């Protein structure tokens, strides 16, 4: 599993990790476990501008279709093409090869939670 | 919020196996133990084990009552045989889809959907007033009994299911045909051994007393290790039944659907009287405005219950079930469309978040198990 330190989370269960000018976005372990078998993702086009909290696409599991939201603002520079043929990577490795998009020109979002706060948030939700 | 969902006798087993639980039809049931994909594959390639105890069982002792409420001619059913049939209301709407078991004591067992159990029971009872008293009992005994909570039902499904159950019983399973049953023991547990299922695979459904449920479940899991057995939840049950083209009550049919629209003509014996018969005959004479079809998606989008079917920019129908077909490698669904769009090969759109995703009508079932040599 990828290094979680430096990762921050939205209450809508996406994570973001900044690495220099680039931010990588995916969904949390909790989110993938709640969704179950991911079978399809509808993702934005490269070049698209996203605001923090804007809908970035749709993730479909066997159970249901759910919206994905961008935890930070920025311009889409890459979408994970591997997920087209292997959507199950989101389940198997949500913080690694199950990443979803990369952004540049990132505008930060002060409302994001660090891992400890996110874990507490999830704990609170499941009770 | 207070959720009062019933637990089956196998609840603790599911928790111990790490199942994700879900509420279904008033019961808390395993949704999945590992992943739906893996459980689905285990059933297609090896064997899966299902807790189906949420299903209801009703016992009707009075044949004339059974004839009145069931869409097929139960008198043609020999003891030890099973038929798939419908309960319809007087307007021909489908109240439930059921399995009818002809028991050796001349009574009939109906295996009914979990969420419909109590409604079916009340409805059948309300139809029993005009019939003769139950055999062996007076009116006070009731001509229909709601016995679902006394029984555990365990499904053993997949190409290795018959061999697995055979190793645990002295009953000669080779002589138990599809849609037939015998009474016997499995792992020393007295069972009704029923060659039925809702997965498109061969296998059995085993009815046993609640007190024996854990013993039977564990024995099957242990003995099935060498077969690659996996416990399978309701998630896989749904993707399996969809591939097999089997309708799900509440999704693909309900009281607003008549059996002809649902493509279930073969469950009707219109030459005998039953509730709904007249309305169904009238509907046939009027002609149908919509029929259930199977379709495959021509792109990667996933059809879902309630999505619109569109043709030439107009809404023409509704998806009743849809999902990925793991075994086939594409996405499939069933939908109600006008008869003019029902021929295999016909193309229409499925409105997926505002886009008409291309789909093509195909013959049901989507998946048919390979016949053993």
Image (cartoon, helix red, strand yellow):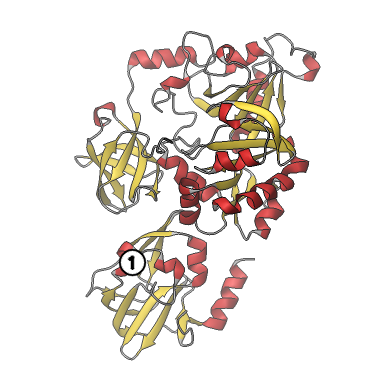
Residue A91, above or below B208: below
Task: Residue A21 in the image: state x and y as whole percent.
Answer: 30, 89
**Occupied quadrant, residue B185:** top right
In this rendering, position of residue B30 left or right of residue A82? right
Left/right placement of residue B360 relative to residue B59 reads: left
Q: Is residue B307 left or right of residue B200?
A: left
Q: Is residue B4 visible?
A: no
Foreground of the two, A51 or B189: B189
Instruction: Give the residue drawn at x 45%, y 55%.
Output: B37
**Mark 1, residue position:** A83
Spot occupied by residue B193 in the image (x, y as percentages of width and height): 64, 32
Query: Where residue A93 appears, x then y in whole percent?
Result: 44, 72
Q: Give the camera-side residue of B36 and B204.
A: B204
- Return the residue nearer the eye: B353 or B84: B84
Name the element at disc 1: helix
Give the tally of numbered discs: 1
Question: Which quadrant, please, contains the C terminus of chain B?
Answer: top left
| Figure check: A106 above or below B306 | below
Identify the residue at horizontal 48%, vertical 60% (top origin): A36
The image quarter containing residue A15 is: bottom left
Where B28 falls versus B127 (above or below)? below
């Amino acid at each position: 599993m990828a290094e979680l330190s430096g990762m921050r989370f939205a209450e809508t269960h996406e994570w973001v990790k900044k690495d220099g000018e680039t931010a990588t976005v995916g969904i949390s372990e909790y989110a993938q476990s709640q969704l179950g078998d991911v079978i399809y993702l509808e993702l934005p086009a490269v070049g698209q501008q996203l605001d923090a909290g804007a809908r970035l696409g749709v993730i479909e599991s066997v159970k249901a279709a759910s919206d994905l939201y961008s935890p930070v603002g920025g311009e889409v520079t890459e979408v994970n093409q591997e997920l087209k043929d292997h959507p199950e990577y989101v389940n198997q490795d949500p913080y690694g090869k199950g990443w979803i998009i990369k952004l540049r020109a990132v505008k930060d979002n002060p409302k994001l939670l660090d891992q400890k706060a996110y874990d507490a948030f999830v704990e609170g939700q499941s009770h | 919020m207070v959720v009062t969902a019933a637990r089956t006798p196998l609840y603790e087993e599911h928790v111990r196996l790490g199942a994700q639980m879900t509420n279904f039809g008033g019961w808390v049931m395993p949704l999945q133990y590992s992943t739906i994909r893996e459980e689905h594959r285990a059933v297609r390639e090896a064997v899966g084990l299902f807790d189906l105890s949420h299903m209801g069982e009703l016992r009707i002792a009075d044949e004339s009552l059974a004839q009145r409420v069931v869409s097929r001619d139960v008198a043609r059913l020999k003891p030890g045989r099973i038929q798939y049939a419908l309960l319809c209301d007087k307007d021909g709407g489908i109240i439930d889809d059921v399995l009818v078991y002809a028991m050796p004591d001349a009574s009939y067992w109906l295996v009914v959907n979990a969420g419909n159990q109590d409604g079916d029971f009340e409805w059948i009872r309300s139809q029993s007033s005009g019939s003769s008293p139950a055999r062996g009992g007076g009116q006070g005994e009731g001509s229909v009994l709601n016995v679902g909570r006394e029984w555990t039902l365990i499904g053993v499904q997949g190409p290795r299911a018959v061999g697995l159950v055979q190793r645990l019983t002295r009953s000669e399973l080779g002589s138990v045909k599809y849609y037939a049953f015998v009474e016997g023991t499995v792992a020393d547990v007295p069972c009704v051994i029923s060659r039925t299922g809702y997965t498109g695979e061969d296998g059995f459904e085993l009815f046993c007393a609640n007190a024996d449920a854990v013993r039977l479940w564990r024995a099957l899991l242990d003995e099935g290790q060498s077969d690659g057995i996996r416990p399978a939840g309701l998630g896989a049950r749904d993707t399996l039944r969809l591939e097999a083209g089997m309708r799900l009550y509440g999704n693909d049919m309900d009281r607003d659907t008549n059996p002809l629209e649902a493509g279930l003509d073969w469950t009707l014996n219109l030459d005998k009287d039953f509730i709904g018969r007249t309305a169904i005959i009238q509907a046939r004479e009027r002609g149908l405005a919509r029929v259930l079809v199977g379709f495959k998606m021509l792109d990667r989008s996933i059809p879902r219950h309630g999505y619109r079917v569109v043709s030439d920019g107009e809404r023409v129908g509704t998806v009743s079930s849809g999902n990925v077909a793991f075994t086939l490698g594409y996405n499939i669904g069933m939908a109600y469309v006008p008869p003019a769009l029902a021929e295999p090969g016909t193309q229409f759109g499925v409105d997926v978040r505002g886009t008409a995703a291309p789909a093509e009508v195909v013959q049901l079932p989507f998946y048919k198990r390979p016949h053993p040599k």
